[in-house]
Image (spheres, rainbow, N blue to C red):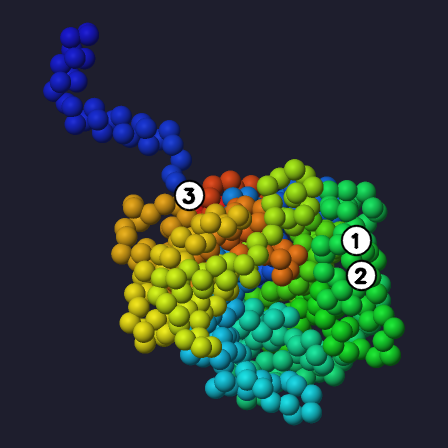
Amino acid sequence: MKAVLNRMTRSFPVCALALVLLVAAGCHKPRQEKVFRTPRLAAIVMVDMLPSSFPDRYGANLGEGGFRRLIDRGAWMTNAHVGYGSSNTASGHATISTGRYPSDHGIVAYQWHKAGLSKPISATTDQSYSVLGYKDDKIGPGGAPSQVIGATLGGRLKQAHGADARVWSCSLKELSAVLLGGESADGAVWWEGIEGQFLSSNYYDDRLPAWVTQLNKDRVVDNRFGDSWERMLSLDAYRNCDADDVPYERGPQTLWLNNMPKTLGPSMPTPNRIYYRQLRTSPFGNELVFETAKRAIINESLGADDTPDLLMLSLSSTDYCGYLFGPDSHEMADMFYRTDRQLAAWFDFLDAQVGLENCLIAVVSDHGACPTPEYAQGLGKDAGRVDLNAIATSIEDALVTEFGSPGDDFYYLGFIDLPWIYINDHLMELKGHDIDRANEIVARTLKGFRGVEHAINCTLLAGKPDSELSEIERLVRRSYFPGRSGSVYLGLRSGWYPSNVTSGPLTANDYDTHIPMWLMGPGIKPMTYSNRVEMPDLTATLARFLKVAPDPDARGSVLDDIVE
């Protein structure tokens, strides 16, 4: 019998193989297709300056409906990064909006410098347009995404689904609202802190939307006048913070002391620009953004039909607060706790108005922040302040030594706008000096300063293949856009920061580029995802759910692992 079986096997190898495959196929279930259910509304919340450490650092005191709901019911990308080396608000918002890096979309910062111009070039303020919404018919330049290179998610949504797909954005900052909304937005709304008006631009429409006009008439911005900003929780919830009322915080810049609690508009007869500046720096500034977003949903009928709509909002108060008080302050911890409760109310609103089963929700930050150097020093860490004036003087002296005097009232150094060093290339060309040589001198000079980790001549990166780049060079090249970035990248050492503000982002260090990121909604697996994710991956995934054609210039990949 054995011989017979052997002969049968030799005589019929194809049949035997077919039988094995058939049996194997019966033992395995067919691979299930991923479910990319198109939402009625994609609602993206960008939290401006939120360190990735906060969910763990303060997570024990979270409520159930905000960040905790995202953690339990959504996909939490614990290893998410911006993906480039110049972390800042403008680049972060443009990267989420486009799915590309600054080297592609061109928004290297909120402004950039050009030799011969008396003012920097704004990323969003465009003299070709006029602002809408000021009191007393004031006129000023309007916001527009004219500087963004390439299509945005909102623009591609319009291309895919036509005019019935609605795209709106809102923020306290013009910069954030304009960059999120993109070139085809139906509207972008922001806020100004002098008279407390909600504004837009005639880039979007000739008149301010009626509901925004009503928002201004309702003066919701004055509801917090005279209120006290107190700790929301017991003092024990702030035990992981720095001490309260430390001298290196900068509360006096808003006529506040550095301690909690704080009064909004103390000893003022009526709301004024001081109160509005305090308001935007407090957690209550975010309430204005959520109120604007709610009215946009109601009045623009967002999520009301099966054609997908897109609403993108940015919470700027965390950013304003972080620059003044630093990420280790009681103020920033309380901001996080209150943002948690505000998100819970926002999700409840979406559920009541649109239905969470019809919403795809993303919450992400544009950047983190450097730990406050003085606080880090107290913990025994290598940290400190970088003297930009001394750096500027040394750069100019080194260039003068190399090239001779630039002439009266002229300087070889154009600007320092970290992380970029701008050379006065116009002057260098007039005098026939070698600009590449100047860049090398600047880079060499920077490396002599304590607190400087990287000094990179960006013009040398352009022709190199990726395989020849170090990790920092790869991140810098993704940040560099010729004619907008400076020619030399200054990367600060971990724990070091300039002395002009308490803290903020600037670098390719992990605390700047590692960001919180969540995606929640139908078709998203509730899970903690530890693989590396970058900002463009989130945009690519949103586009896939929205049934938008792939962008050939996009840098991200769809996050299939988090999709059911």
Which of pointers 3 and 2 lies earlier in the amino acid sequence?
A: 3
Question: Any mark on residue 32, and which?
Answer: 3
Which residue does the numbered mark 2 point to in the structure image? 257
Q: Residues within 10 Å of mark 1 (few under 14, many from 20)?
A: some
- Left or right of 314, for residue 337: right
Q: Nearer the viewer, mark 1 or mark 3?
A: 1
| Alpha carbons under labels 3 and 2: distance apart | 59 Å
**Res 521 seen here:** no
**Amino acid at circle 1:** Asp
**Amino acid at circle 2:** Leu
Residue 318: image quadrant is bottom right
- Left or right of 66, for residue 302: left
Q: Residue at x 60, y 60 (%)?
A: 48
Find residue 202 and report its horizontal and vertical position in percent: 54, 85
Q: Residues within 10 Å of mark 2 (few under 14, many from 20)?
A: some
Q: Residue at x 44, y 71 (%)?
A: 411
The residue tagged with tag 2: helix, strand or loop? loop
Question: Any mark on residue 446, and which?
Answer: none
**On screen, residue 408 above or below 32:** below
| Alpha carbons under labels 1 and 3: distance apart | 57 Å
Q: Residue at x 51, y 40 (%)?
A: 530
Asked whether the beta carbons under mark 1 and mark 2 sit within 8 Å of each other, the answer is: yes
**Amino acid at circle 3:** Gln
Q: Nearer the viewer, mark 3 or mark 2?
A: 2
Find residue 397 and report its horizontal and vertical position in percent: 45, 62
**Res 90 seen here:** yes
**On screen, residue 540 above or below 240:** below
**On screen, residue 381 above or below 155:** above
The residue tagged with tag 1: helix, strand or loop? loop
Which residue does the numbered mark 1 point to in the structure image? 245
